[in-house]
Image (cartoon, rainbow, N blue to C red):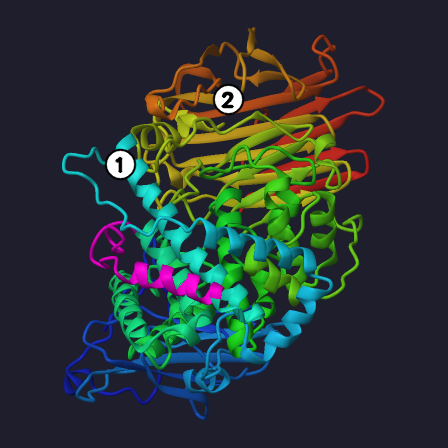
Amino acid sequence: MIRIGCVLMFAAGSINLAAAGVELDQAPAEPGDWGYRPEEGGTVAVDPPAFSWRPTKGIATYTVQIATDASFQPVVREQAGISWNTWCADKPIGPGTYHWRYRGVTESGEMTEWSLVRSFTVPADAAVSPQPALSELLARMPQEHPRLMFRGEDIESLKTLAAGPLARRWQALVAQADKLLKTPPDTSEPPKYPEGTEFKGEAWKKIWWGNRVRAIAAADGAATLGFVYRLTGDEKYAQGARGLLVAIAAWDPEGSTQYKYNDEAAMPLLYLTSRAYDWAYPVLSETDRAAIVTMMRARGMQCFNHLTKANHLWRPYASHSNRAWHKLGELAIAFHGDIPEADRWLDFAMTVFYTAYPVWSDSDGGWFEGAAYWSSYMSRFMYWAQAVRAAFAIDVFERPFFRRAGDFGMYLLPPGTNTGGFGDQAPPMTSRDIGPLMASFAAGARNPYWKWYAEETGADIAGGYVGFLAAAHSKDLEATAPTDRPASVCFRGTGLAVLNTDLLDGSANHQVVFKSSPMGRQSHGYNANNAFLLHVNGERLFLCSGKRDVYGSPHHQNWMWHSRSDNAILVNGEGQVKHSQKATGRITAFATSDTVDVVAGEAGASYENLDRWSRRIVFLKPNVIVIHDLLVAPEPSTFQWNLHAPAPFALGENGATWSGKPGHVRVRFLEPAGLALSQTDQFDPPPAEWAKFNLNEWHLTADCQEKTGTRVFVTLIEILDTPDQAPLDSLLAGPDGDGVRVLTIGSRENPAKVEFGPTSFTVTAGKFEKQFEDE
């Protein structure tokens, strides 16, 4: 019998395993696995749901059954011949409670026993988003070129728009194409790393990123010329595109732009070259086409093999793979009929989209990897949104995440914000940086709040041919300020809470950002769980420290990935497990109102030397923050409470003040007494000298040197109007016999009171009164 980590039912009618000779691998999902979906007893957000299971070696295809009864009498839906270990039906199954199971079939036709049975519920409000079968996709797709992002029948309407409402965009495109003809990009083959090049060093980075830049310049130049040719009919643009394509086809696909050698150079060639081929197709000779097809087949195979050998549909958390699949999808659309494997690649890409994407989010609209990677990856994904709209009439905004995709940016970076939040490369992103993406989201989802955001930041849909096509399909939409939305939000699926005082004006907004994520500390979302940020008047104040010189450098790994770089707590000087999916946290409580926001998280599982770390944050808007930390270690330990800012602190007795461009802040450690406070502006190790960052960041440590198994910190943070503002009245009483501490803040006439206990806490402030239980 197969062991599994939860109690599930065996279905009737299973085959004898010994007779079949093949056994399903039903081991429980581990960190980094996509997991069995729908999970036992789960409620899905989409009808039909995505089904996922652990792949089994030696299995050629799978069969899935869905039934309303665990005996599978009758079967509501059965699908055989599934090539992948995930599947989404091509028709909705309707609201209700269902059961599902799967089995494998070998190349010789042997069948495994049925898997364990899992139940799930489709609610009445589930988004309807079936995955069209491959045969249906191929029937919908134009058999002639163009078919990427627009069809032949679209050209006349695009010409009309170019002569009318989109004239400015069009004129900019023509000017860009003329410049490309006058000064073509460098088409010499990008160089390889010379022998002895230091991996991740300055010379390595220059070639690594430089080759990406060169590939984009040549391939996107060809695509731009091809697009302008399609709307003008002027063959000078087509011949310009042809010349670039023929030059790119001469590059060795096993050389400097090979996928494993440099995927940053390889990926642009997958999709940009595909667009150029599709749009310049009429002027390409048979010889041209053969050379391009041979080169693109090799590149497509490299990418497909990388994704499938890495079991992307079961272990989908490799960052780059989450943009590689849809670039392969564009290639598959453009080269349908020319590359024998193209249709299989298309089936794979569509299966990823419907069953295992986006992995860094949930239906709540949050994003795990931070604002920079949200902006970068979602901007690229919008290429795919246009591709499937044109080729297959698929609207990506029918999917739950994309219905809310802009909320992440709107809450994290209200207009006028210069902060960025957690995650690689996020600080200091601004609201203006994400304005074009928000405009694109607004047009796709027809969301008036995101339209308002884009207008407030002075942004429109990005330029170029992608922007032209996006604008061509956008419809009139009236912008609406989010005055009816709460100012704060919690993205539980990704473990991020954003507490704002002003959602409409970032320059007047005080913001607390809190992370405690079930996704852990992996990839570009490496920051410590239970860490927080404080932004004042739309600027960074208490920040996540360090700046990436190159991914995986000594500074990146040993400072930024270490918990000491965050506003978090060390135990005996040690932080959380670094850069790991296993270092998980979770948000255990959240509430928001006009006057009080509350968030709490649990991060004990992130440490190897800690059983519990419950952090409760109470934001008494607009200028008082209370933080209660309860830590339990398996043995007596010391604890270090860390804080980072963009200039020195003024240290005092059991507290500190900070003054600078954003404002003035006072920090008081109400408990414990006798902390050893110190600060430094040094990084260990610092960024590489060649990066020339000149970081001015200061790191405060409040060290509790008395060893104990249980430690409580109670910290009061005040955002001040002036640096010499008198401290707020406060009184901390306790703990009583039950371990309850009571903090009273403010005047006797109108105090706020927070009661912290071992398993719950209560907040009372004006009309806000709520008790929170630890989950």
**Residue at 35% over, 40% down:** 579
Name which quarter of the figure residue 521 lies in.
top left
Q: Amino acid at mark 2?
A: His
* In the foreground, 332 or 740: 332
* Residue 713, horizontal then vertical, whole percent: 53, 23
x and y, in percent, of residue 16 in the image:
21, 86
Q: Nearer the viewer, residue 411 or 181?
A: 181
Query: Disc 2 on helix, strand or loop?
Result: strand
**Does residue 646 appear left or right of residue 259 in this picture?**
right
Magenta highlight range: 236-262
Q: Was residue 342 drawn as part of the magenta stretch in this picture?
A: no
**Crowding at mark 1 (Cα within 10 Å: few <14, some 14-19, many 20+):** some
Q: What is the three-letter code of the residue carrying label 1?
A: Trp
Residue at screen point 65% across, 62% down: 471
Label 2 to label 1: alpha-carbon separation: 31 Å
Q: Which mark is residue 441?
A: none
Kindly identify which numbered label has been placed on residue 204: 1
Question: Total number of numbered labels?
Answer: 2
Q: Are marks 2 and 1 in contact (CB under 8 Å)?
A: no
The residue tagged 2 is 644
